[in-house]
Image: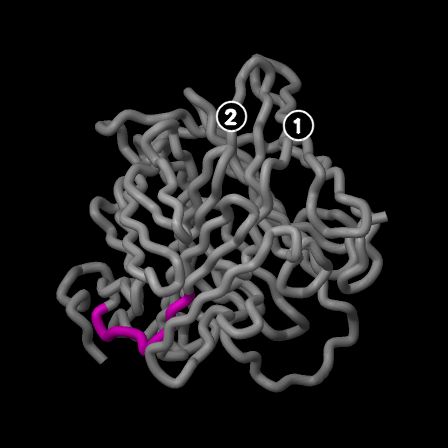
């Protein structure tokens, strides 16, 4: 089936662009953004699932002790540049440099018109491929970029001030194969499911730091990357040979887990920087966002699920009620204050720990930290 973009010379195979991922039902293509200050946090997710015929999106804000979210889902548009579903839209104003996000869901307490502008070039993380037995469970490329935000957000009865202080955040574009939608029937697994994932993009004034790792139950990384990305000017390249970053091979993490939970009470990233010796970045949590607010592991609004047509819903939770070991609450992003020598910064530490992880003291599916 042809789409308007088949008129551009961008094909990667002999297939039309609408036929994606070799037909794998879990093929996806997603925008993810977050933004934060020391006072609030917001997140945007919009994903397309061409082999399920679904587009969905979510917008969520954590402020004043409340996590408030709106969700939308519907049939995928034939023109993939129509990145809107229900009241949520993501506009590619200038590729890899400027995106506009609009949300018009006053009935669910959320209205926004915000623009993200690149602070760094786009950083391509190493391809993340994982099998479950003989089944391809994950095969993902992700481009991570630090951004700054302008615009306006209304959450509940409050207008969040995006002008009084810098509002930093992250743009994450990922695509490939990842578990989405309703799972296909399969024989029960022989072992307890296991995933351990940390993702830490950190904004500083002149440079930014990014770290990502997947580890197995013994704490051995099966995908890991670290990079230092300089803050760019509007005329600097955001992709291609001129995009600058320094890859850091020796970056490691030490998470202090909150007793009885699977979220951090703080963390330290350490690495050696050529010519400067050992470096350490200490991360102090300020607030926690449960990723269910953007659809991740949500019992109703999980990514790629068909709802029978275009549907919109919303929810509110007191943040204190979400500090649990429930399956839909253990995947989190924490806004963190970052101390790197004399530098002071702000970023996020994403954590997803399901199943055993020896270095953390996790032994079962969702037991808490000792």
Q: Nearer the viewer, residue 55 or 197?
A: 55
Q: Nearer the viewer, residue 141 or 314?
A: 314
Q: Is residue 261 left or right of residue 303?
A: right
The magenta-colored residue range is 71-79
- The residue beneath circle 1 is 270
**Residue sitting at 63 percent across and 20 percent down?**
279
Under tag 1, what secondary structure? strand
The vertical placement of 300 against 90, above or below, is below
Classify 10 Å Cα crowding around label 1: few (below 14), some (14-19), many (20 and above): some
The vertical placement of 206 against 71, above or below, is above
The vertical placement of 185 against 221, above or below, is below
99 drawn magenta: no
- Marks 2 and 1 sit apart, C-alpha to C-alpha, by 16 Å
Q: Is residue 225 visible?
A: no
The vertical placement of 33 against 356, above or below, is above
Residue that sits furthest to the front in the current view:
157
Q: Quadrant of residue 337?
A: top right
Q: Nearer the viewer, residue 25 or 63?
A: 63
**Residue sitting at 47 percent across and 30 percent down?**
203
Whole-percent x and y of residue 84?
A: 28, 64
**Residue sitting at 41 percent across and 53 percent down?**
156
Which label number is shown at residue 339?
Answer: none
Whole-percent x and y of residue 204?
A: 47, 25
Q: Are marks 2 and 1 in contact (CB under 8 Å)?
A: no
Total marks shown come to: 2
Q: Is residue 180 visible?
A: yes
- The residue beneath circle 2 is 345
Whole-percent x and y of residue 16?
A: 25, 73
Under tag 2, what secondary structure? strand
Q: Is residue 258 left or right of residue 299?
A: right
């Amino acid at each position: 089936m042809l789409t308007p973009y088949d008129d551009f010379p961008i094909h990667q195979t002999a297939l039309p662009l609408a036929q994606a991922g070799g037909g794998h039902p879990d093929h996806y293509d997603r925008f993810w953004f977050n933004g934060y200050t020391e006072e609030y946090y917001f997140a945007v997710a919009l994903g397309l699932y061409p082999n399920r015929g679904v587009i969905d999106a979510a917008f969520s804000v954590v402020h004043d002790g409340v996590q408030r979210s709106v969700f939308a889902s519907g049939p995928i548009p034939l023109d993939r540049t129509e990145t809107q579903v229900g009241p949520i839209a993501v506009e590619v104003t200038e590729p890899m440099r400027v995106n506009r996000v609009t949300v018009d869901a006053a009935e669910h307490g959320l209205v926004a018109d915000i623009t993200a502008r690149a602070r760094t070039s786009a950083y391509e993380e190493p391809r993340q491929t994982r099998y479950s037995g003989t089944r391809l469970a994950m095969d993902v490329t992700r481009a991570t970029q630090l951004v700054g935000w302008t615009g306006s957000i209304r959450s509940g009865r409050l207008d969040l001030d995006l002008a009084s202080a810098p509002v930093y955040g992250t743009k994450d574009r990922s695509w490939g194969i990842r578990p989405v939608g309703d799972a296909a029937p399969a024989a029960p697994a022989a072992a307890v499911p296991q995933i351990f994932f940390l993702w830490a993009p950190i904004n500083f004034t002149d440079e930014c730091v990014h770290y990502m790792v997947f580890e197995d139950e013994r704490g051995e990384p099966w995908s890991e990357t670290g990079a230092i990305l300089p803050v760019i000017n509007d005329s600097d390249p955001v992709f291609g040979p001129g995009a600058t970053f320094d890859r850091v091979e020796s970056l490691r993490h030490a998470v202090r887990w909150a007793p009885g939970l699977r979220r951090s009470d703080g963390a330290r990233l350490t690495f050696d920087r050529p010519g400067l010796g050992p470096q350490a970045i200490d991360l102090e949590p300020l607030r926690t966002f449960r990723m269910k607010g953007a659809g991740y592991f949500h019992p109703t609004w999980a990514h790629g699920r068909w709802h029978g047509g275009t549907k919109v819903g919303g929810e509110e939770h007191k943040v204190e009620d979400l500090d649990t070991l429930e399956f839909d609450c253990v995947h989190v992003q924490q806004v963190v204050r970052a101390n790197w020598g004399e530098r002071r910064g702000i970023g996020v530490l994403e954590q997803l720990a399901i199943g055993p992880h020896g270095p953390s003291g996790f032994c079962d599916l969702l037991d808490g930290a000792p």
